Amino acid sequence: AALKRFQQIRPKVFLTVDRYPQGGEEVELLPKVKEIVKGLPTLKKVLIVASKPDSHSKDISAIKNSCFLDDFLKLGIEKDGSVPPMTFEQVSFSHPVTINYTSGTTGLPKAVVHGSGILMSAYGMSVINLDCDRDSRWLWTMPMGTAVWIFHAAMHFLGQTLVIYEGDPYFQPLTSLWDIIEKWKISRTLIVSKIVNEFQKRGLLPNKNQDLSSLKCIFTGISAAKIQTFDFMKEVSEDLMYTTTYGSTESMSFCLINTFSLPAYKGEINAVNLGIFLQVVDKTGNPVVGEMGDMVISKPMPSLPIGFWGDSDGSAYREKYFSKYSGVFTTGDCAIINPVTKNWIICCRSDETLNPKGTRYGSSEIYDIVEVFPEVQDSLCVSQYNKDMEERAILFLKFREGYSYNEKLIARIRKAIEKHLSFLHVPDVIIEIQEIPYSITEKKAEIIVKKIINNQPFNQDTVRNPECLKYYFNIPALQGF
């Protein structure tokens, strides 16, 4: 997966660590680095960051043009031991600064190029929306290279402190997150929605003796926060701002985020970030309020991409984002603007919407109801089509240990969906599944499962746990539709 991304941009320098912790174990990266380097003939230098003192004892001779980073940095020291001053070059506002990649669920991940406009976006969000200053301390734990990670790194440009954590700060031990916040006086932290859901289900609250007075805001991303987690966060602290966010790889920005100066409502986002003209439109491209539609950016903004790497005439970029609705940038996501509060409710990806029985809705609406059940650990809801393109909704449920599929439980789940939504929202088929697939950025891999059950080709390179995809093939209950 890494090689497919890097081959597109023909890099000259490759920077990597030698190993990293995951789930209480250490994952050795050098064997993978060796294979990646073989596939990148343009590389002039491979720089390896030593994760521990004993890392230097590792044999890296088989990795072409490689050396440890600290050895490389010594090459720049003058004979007298001094470090020469850095030389800065003035470039244009649209000069390429960074590259990140789309998810790749519908094909080869695209290399998205951004300029220095990402700094303006970071400034507006942190300083104005979230009232940050030079005393602010951030804790984000996101995969390196994602848009969220790059956005986080930009906070350092504003003089704010980044607390960098290696490994899993959530469940080892169970109070780990609260311990870190207390120890390092964290003021703002971003947590993946899936983790917040698990905290709520397990009841992982801070100890009464812990001092979390430094913590001003917890915001969650990657996917929409569930309603019940808002009440849970009130138990953490009455004064804490807890908010879901919305952003994208392409905008390199939190397009939507709660601001302290406006009322906040559970499950909704109260503000569009400054400098962003964001709308919800119907199938004809007209703005709508109170109904689900596609989210579009209708005017230029500083942090939109310069384009795709290698797309010299911009045709691929325009086709991807400007072809669906003329003259506006399509984000690929769906939302509803609450006609009463004027706040935003994020529904799902545009290609993940369900429309069985003529009722269009987002999978997150189902998850908000189903995952409240203590028996349910996780879920995934997608559409299946027959040869006549008739559609039905399929709900996959992963049960917690000690629970399994039974008709009484399924009846309760169906009844809850009908009560809170409508009978038209009740999935046609409910199936027990051993595992739910997730992307490397912790999003449910709905599109891939949808492709599998509809016998379409798919790309599993972006799936964090691809071994579970085998469970979705040849399911008897889905045959003969």
Image (spheres, rainbow, N blue to C red):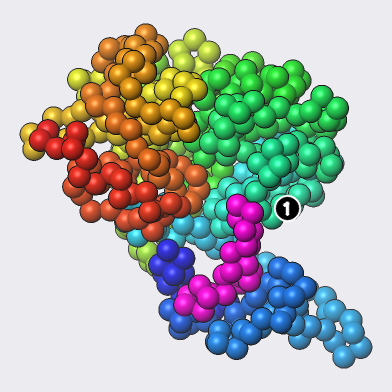
Location of residue 454 with respect to 465 vertically, above or below:
above
Q: Is residue 423 left or right of residue 440?
A: left
Image-quadrant location for residue 309: bottom left
Furthest residue in direction bottom, as rendered: 79
Above or below, comparing residue 110 to residue 385 in the picture: below
Q: Would residue 143 be found to the left or right of residue 5 on screen?
A: right
Residue beneath the point at 71% across and 48% down: 155
**Does the magenta segment cover residue 462?**
no
In this rendering, the answer to whether 269 lies above or below 136 is above
Which one is in front, 166 or 176? 176
Q: Residue 257: x and y, percent?
A: 59, 31
**How many tags in the picture?**
1
Amino acid bearing label 1: Ile
Q: Position of residue 43 (x, y in %)?
A: 52, 81
Q: Quadrant of the C terminus?
A: top left
Q: Which residue is mark 1?
A: 164
Q: Can residue 177 be seen from the camera position used here?
A: no
Would residue 17 be counted in the magenta stretch? yes
- Work out which quarter of the rendered image holds the N terminus and state it: bottom left
Magenta-highlighted residues:
15-36
Name the spot of residue 15 as percent of width and height, x first: 61, 72
- Residue at 85% in and 30% down: 211
Name the spot of residue 9 as percent of width and height, x first.
Answer: 45, 70
Q: Nearer the viewer, residue 168 or 347?
A: 168
Q: Residue furthest right?
A: 80
